[in-house]
Structures are given as C-alpha cells and as structure tokens.
Amino acid sequence: MARRLAGALLLFLLSACAPSPSDRQTVRFWVMGREGEAIAQLIPEFERANPDIRVRVQQIPWTSAHEKLLTAFAGDSLPDLCQLGNTWLPEFTALRALAPLESRVAESRTIAAADYFPGIWATNVVDGRLYGVPWYVDTRLLFYRKDLLAAAGIDAPPRSWAEWERAMAALKKARESGKDSPGYAMLLPLNEFEPLLALALQQDEPLLRDQQSRGDFAGPGFRRALEFYSAAFRNGWAPAMGGGEISNVWTEFGRGRFAFYISGPWNIEEFRRRLPPERQGDWMTAPLPGPDGPGASTAGGASLVVFRSSRHPEAAWRLVEYLSAPAVQLRFHELTGNLPPRRSAWRDERLAGDPHAAAFRDQLERVRPAPKIPEWERIVNEMQLIAEQVARGRMDVDQAGRELDRRIDVMLEKRRWMLARGRAS
C-alpha cells in the first residue's frame, strides 16, 4: 500500500513539473517541397528536448511557396519560422519581414559563422546584416563519364576553360571518327540558367553596376562568360535544346549521348539509382572549371529565417539552433541528399568517404552569391531567355549584352528612383 502511494505521489510530481498543453508554445514552421517530409522525422527529438515547445510543420509546394509567402505577409499571417530560398531572402528583407539574427548568432553556442562555407553564409547577409542561417547548400559542378573521356585521349577532368574546350573538341573528333564517344560532348539545357550564371560569377566584373541599379551584361565579364557558353553550341559540342527535349537525362547519360553535365548534388543518388550496374564505375564528379583554373559556382540552397511578426521568436530560434547542429545536418543529409553548409559536418565519414561528394566539398569553398536584390529572379529569367537566342544563332553575344542591359535597366528603374532618395536597401 505504501509503495502504491509513493508511486502515485511520484507520478503526480512529475506531471506537475511537465508543462501543460496550455503552457506550451506552438511554433509554426513552413517547409518547402520534400524537405517537409524529412523534417517530420527530426522534430520529435527537438520536442522531447524542449517539452515547452510544440512544432507545427506545414509543407508547401515550391511552385506555390513564393505566392503563399507574399499573401501571408500582406495578410499578417506569416509563420514563426520558414525555409527560404537564398534568392528570395533579399525580397523579404526589403519588405522588412525578416528578423535580423546577428546578435543571436553572436550569443549562440551552436552556430559558429566561421564553420560555414563563406559564400553560402554571404547569401544571408544583406546590407551588412544577417537575416538567415544556411540550412542546406546547393551548387553546380561537372558530372562526367570517365570512360568516354579516356576513349578520346583525356586522362583527367578539365580544370580550366582551355582544358574544357580541348576535351570537348577531342570528344567531338572521337565521335566523328566512329570511336566509342557520345553524341555530344556536353548537355547544356537551354531552360537551365545555372550553368551560364556560374560562368558569369567566375568573372571579376559584377553583373550589375551603379549600386546594383543597372545591368552590366554588355561589359567584358559577362561577355566572356556568354562567349564561352555560346561556343559550346556553335562548335557542335552541345545540342541547342531544352531539358524537355531530353527524354531521360540519366538514361541518355548512361547511353553515352553526352559526356559532361552540369548539375547539383541531388543527382549523385539519382545516377547511383538509375544507371545500370555496368556503368556505375564510369562516372564521377569534378569541380567546375574556371577561366584560369578551378572556378567558382553558384551559392544556392535554402536558409532558416525568423519573421519579425513571430509570436514566439525565442522558441523559433531554439529550433533554428537544433536544425543547425552538425549531427542533425548529417541526419537531414541522409534523409534528403541535401548538402550541409558547415565544414565540420563534412568531416564525418558518411560524407568524407563518399567519392562523388568530394568534388562538392571542394566546390563549396568557391561559391559566390548572386546579386542580392529583390528583382534578381526576374533578371536571371531574362538572362536565360536571351542566352537561348544566342545558342540558337538568332542573336550574337554583343547584341545579347545590349538587349539584356536594356531590359534590366527598365526593371531597375524603381530601384534607381529609391536610391536617389536614399530609400533602397
């Protein structure tokens, strides 16, 4: 009887110490795409460690996420915490929707800015202030067929533009001589802007000038990038077609229709899963070649942001810290294939021992953010459309640069007006 009373008393005391449902804070967390499925497996551990916090995850398709966020901002119904694409961050900063985070990072025992790849961290800094913490990173580099390069007399992946051109010319020559060679040296889908953007970011000259209020696409930097890009089509090294005209990228890569493909980390698992066993030893990844050696690439991915309107900013920040821990980032990588933005996570054997991921680790030290202005996504869309005209031979490089600057200067007219009045961010 005494034991039963003691047990009942202990149970009462434990339940009295635990927060009641009414005392718990509910953090609303919006997550895009398939990451929403993965995050559901990580949240229970956070809630066990933080019994005063309940996380309500809402999964949103990428196709509707931007519009939903803008609608929520207009209706004062944003969540506490959100996954935000890096190129969207300047827009929501300009709307003053995001809470600055530099003071929180300075006090954090979990998040260390020096542990992050600098190009990725820089995507979250706008006008000297930090508005997001990188969650995962995406960049583009070369996937290539080792066997096809060897058959064309190339014993290593290219490291510079000159080596890349020689390799593509050799692959074309091997094809024309009837040797085992791909139909084309490289696939550059015209509906993908990332390859050209990466080539442009490798230049010393910026893509925008005058405080990012005018285009500089007619300048020497972008001109060099577009000339190299268009030469691939002009010389017959790449087919002038969109991604929709390729029946199946993985199948065509396995068949040897092309030897080079610029893509991101998600394709590591796709090639492992989709290529036949006899082709698994024939492909590898390599950092993107630059004008004079290993080059820069795009700094993509997504970050975690806390909205100014959050009702529970402290609880939301605790969730950011939890998701930023290297061990949790590694689990997230295993669930999604997304790459961690912290160097310390890459020391784990699960990544350090992956031969196809090694090139991404190298490339992440040389990534550069795109211009951080709200109009950037519209600008890069115009860049893609004009580049397609060049690839199809309907416009030359000089015409393309001038036309891009004309269109972009129209887009940025309001920005110039605001700068003149000291109001642009």
Image (cartoon, rainbow, N blue to C red):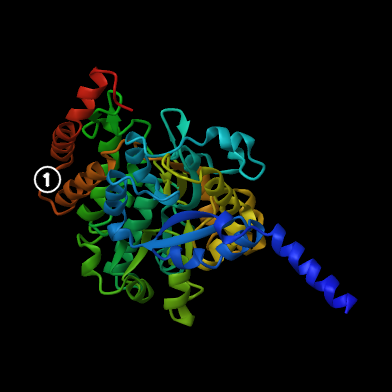
Which residue sits at x=37%, y=48%?
Answer: 78
Q: Amino acid at mark 1?
A: Met
Residue farthest along the left direction in this orientation: 394
Quarter the N terminus occupies: bottom right
Residue farthest along the top direction in this orientation: 421
Which residue sits at x=41%, y=61%?
Answer: 58
Q: Nearer the viewer, residue 420 or 189?
A: 420
Which residue sits at x=89%, y=75%?
Answer: 2
Quick check: 101 left or right of 8? left
The x, y position of residue 243, in whole percent, is: 25, 64
The x, y position of residue 12, in whole percent, is: 74, 66
Q: Nearer the viewer, residue 232 or 80?
A: 80
The x, y position of residue 389, in whole percent, is: 14, 50
- Counting every numbered tag in the picture gives 1
Residue farthest along the right direction in this orientation: 2
Sort mark 1 into few (<14), some (14-19) or many (20+) by Cα contacts within 10 Å.
Answer: some
Query: Please, is residue 130 above or below residue 332 in the view?
Result: above
Quick check: 29 left or right of 232? right
Could you tell me if residue 261 is visible in this image?
A: yes
Query: Please, is residue 75 above or below residue 34 in the view?
Result: above
Quarter the C terminus occupies: top left
The x, y position of residue 290, in whole percent, is: 41, 44
Quick check: 316 left or right of 227? right
Which residue sits at x=24%, y=24%?
Answer: 418
Q: Which residue has dot 1 on it?
A: 395
Could you tell me if residue 288 is visible in this image?
A: no
* SS for dot 1: loop
